[in-house]
Amino acid sequence: MIKYFFLLILSFPAYYFSQGFQVNLQGQKQQGMGGAGTAFIQDAATVFFNPGGMSFVANSVILGATPTIAKGAFQNANTNEISRTNSPVSYPFAAYGVVGLKDSSQLKFGFGIYTPFGSTVQWENGWTGRFALTRLQLRAIFFQPTISYKITNKIGVGAGFIYASGKVNLQKDIPIIDADGNYASAELNGKAEGYGFNTGIYFTPTKKFAVGLTYRSGIKMAVNNGTATFKVPASVAANFPNGKFTSKLPLPSVTTIGFKYEVNSKLNLALDINYVGWKAYDTLAFDYEVNTTSLLDTKSARSYKNTIAFRSGAQYAISTKLMARLGLAYGITPVQNGYVTPETPDANRINYTAGIGYQISNKFKLDASFLFTHLKRSDTNLETNLSGTFKTNVIAPGFSIGYIF
Amino acid sequence: MNVYKISIYTLLVIVLGCKPKFTKPNLTSGEIDATTFVSLGGSIAAGYSNGGVYYQAQKNSLSNLLATQLQLIGSADFKQPYVAESSIGIGNVNNAPSILSNRTDCQGVVSIGPVKIAAQGDVSIFSTNIFASQGPFNNLSVPDLKVIDADINGYNNPFYVRMASSNSSSILSDAILKKPTFFSLMLGLSDVLNFALKGGTADFVTPVAGSIGVGFDASITNVLNKLTANGAKGIIANIPSIKTMAYFNTIYYNSLKLDNATATSLTNFYAVLSPTIQFNEGNNGFVIEDVNQPLGYRQAVNGELILLNVPLDSIKCNKMGSLIPIPDKYVLTLSEIATIENAITSYNTILKNLANSKKLAFVDVNEFFTKVKAGFVYNGVSVNASFVSGGFYSLDGLNLTPRGNALLANEFINAINSNYQSNIPQLVATSYSGIIFP
């Protein structure tokens, strides 16, 4: 019965984690399987995927990175003009370690450093939406010390504290032109900080079946001491004083239920279902320390909604040393019609993933994964009236190396 | 086996899928033959901006921007009566155009505002007829052109004289000379504006009735009959209310700001002769000339318009508007405004009926200018009718910036597309500048 349920999910476009500005590239094995890993406990990336299952992981470390190439473009619905992004490649990385007194200890300690949010969107010079955005860089590194306890051989619980440190840099043009034909511009730069937690339960009633339940809290990333810099013609410089600003960027909570089913000794199937609390991202506000008639505090509605996402994958053992993985996922966008912006031209998405794993020795394991997704969204933004179609292709090949003590 | 397949598909995805692709829609001209496009209009269509006609303003004229897009559906070269690129240009009182610059007022306060770039415009522009060297022209729009003057032979407007095909030609006859297949007609504003710009003290509002050359109805019907005689299609624009324009909305009837002491002393000053004139702390109606008053002055009331050319230094330093009434030529009173607005309403009805009966495209410029006055956001840029900061009106407060012209041209394009089933793309209006800041 369970077997058929899994096959059904895999044969349809499966549902995957929707993104907003979120990146979900925390483990190569999991990424190869569409991002599912809450109930399929394989390596130290479980620190992120399910602290409850961490006590089932061997003492080990794993280190990985996923260069992400995103090519975006926009076609203006009224003018047919096409603009493209020149976004640089971003490098999400993840490092995890799990230790216990013994490999079989009930109590295990873990540590994770990973980058679940972040990207740089850079639009080409002079593009249509330049007065909405020219460049946005978001970076967040999460540090997660974690503790996990294996209550019995069938059930484990765990919790981690998250300290998040981030940077935001937003640039856009201002529609004031000087005698040389250059537009004025604004740059908002700041460091952000936030705190949260990651908890989970892992339960494997039979050898073949496992279920995991996790809750990662939302995190309010607060920019308390940002710097606003304006390049404007001299005659209006007094209207745009350089100075401090504050802002907040809420990162959503994620509640996940995950399943694993071992079809036979070679084939494993996994499914994660996420409920993502994007509703927290209601408004993007910038509060400037010094206001003028031209520089008012801004409040832009984002009105994200909570979403559900499904991610599923299969792992097949070609030999004792070689694993092949495939995944498919579908995510519903949190961005409602009328609120699509050039920062995150988000859309419902299908993620196609694949991966391989190779065991070099008893100690060393290599894993690689590949993700492709295509986004397409047509909208007229209610705030800027920018109207057209955004398309984005994302390619993310990843690689990790694991060492078992 | 599986690994090979995966690798091959992966490679294919990388090679083929990386850069998002769009297909540009095929452009169709619908029922239009855009080959020869001719534009008839006034200052905005001619390329008058910042108080004058100059090369860059002509490049960004409403007519030329519209022609640029019509060229995408097969329109031929659009000839405009360009002035030399090096010329400073000239305005309708031989003045030089303005730029935004620092200036010092009577109180020694420095602020940015429109400053004429020279004591006089380039009058040599009017000394040579350029028809032989540059004509015949597609843009037959002429600053200050009234409907009643469009078919006057030997029309004596220096902007027309320099481009006329002969001493005895009319603007309309020169337009017909081009054998237009498609035209734009944006006339009628000057029929009220010249009166409005003089505060109702000179010139006149063109009457609706009367023969060709006298009345609006007969004159505009004549223009359209001749333009469409050979089956040309076109677009008619209506006339915006003058209340939408920066020129009449920058200085308010009650912009006289007083402290308590000054208000009291002014009230006392007027108490004997004109006890109805009273002042309070804060904003007060200006004292204005009004020949219909027994003493020839009164306080301005809500709805009355102070013109942009009112001498601000006299207001700030020489008691104009308080002890000395603002001269009539700088003020439109309620009755003058009613005369103007009633005429515009009548003209617009005639224009709409003509568009309907001749099945021409109709662009509601009045509605669009009203939308500008309320303010809107275009691709992240706020557009409104505020003087200088609004980005729509040029430094003369009446004519438009390049961005304003592009936004207006897009309204024309929408109307053309919906009437003629064409799909001419709009202009990227953010690529056109607003006011240039020093």
Image (tube, coloured by chain):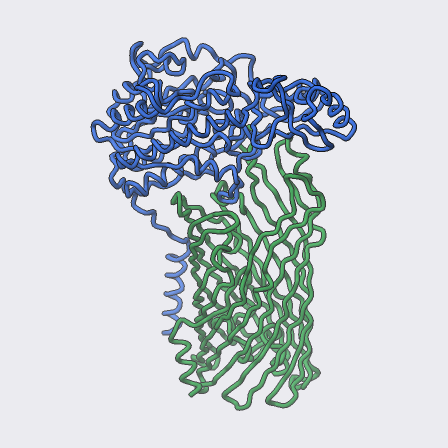
Chain colours: A green, B blue
Q: Residue at x 41, y 59 (%)?
A: B14
Quadrant where the N terminus of chain A is found in the figure: bottom left
Where residue B160 sits, quadrant-wise, is top left
Residue B360 x %, y %: 29, 35
Where residue B387 sits, quadrant-wise, is top right
Residue A245 x %, y %: 69, 48
Residue A405 x %, y %: 63, 78
The residue closer to the viewer here, A27 or A120, is A120
Q: Residue furthest right?
A: B261
Q: How many marks?
A: 0
Where residue B135 sits, quadrant-wise, is top left
Q: Is residue B140 visible?
A: no
The residue closer to the viewer here, B370 or B107, is B370
Q: Residue at x 55, y 15 (%)?
A: B118
Indicate whether A304 appears above or below B349.
Answer: below
Indicate whether B314 appears above or below A320.
Answer: above
Indicate whether B156 appears above or below A360.
Answer: above
Left-right relation of B136 to A174? left
The residue closer to the viewer here, A187 or B328, is B328
Q: Is residue A225 visible?
A: yes
Residue A131 x %, y %: 53, 43
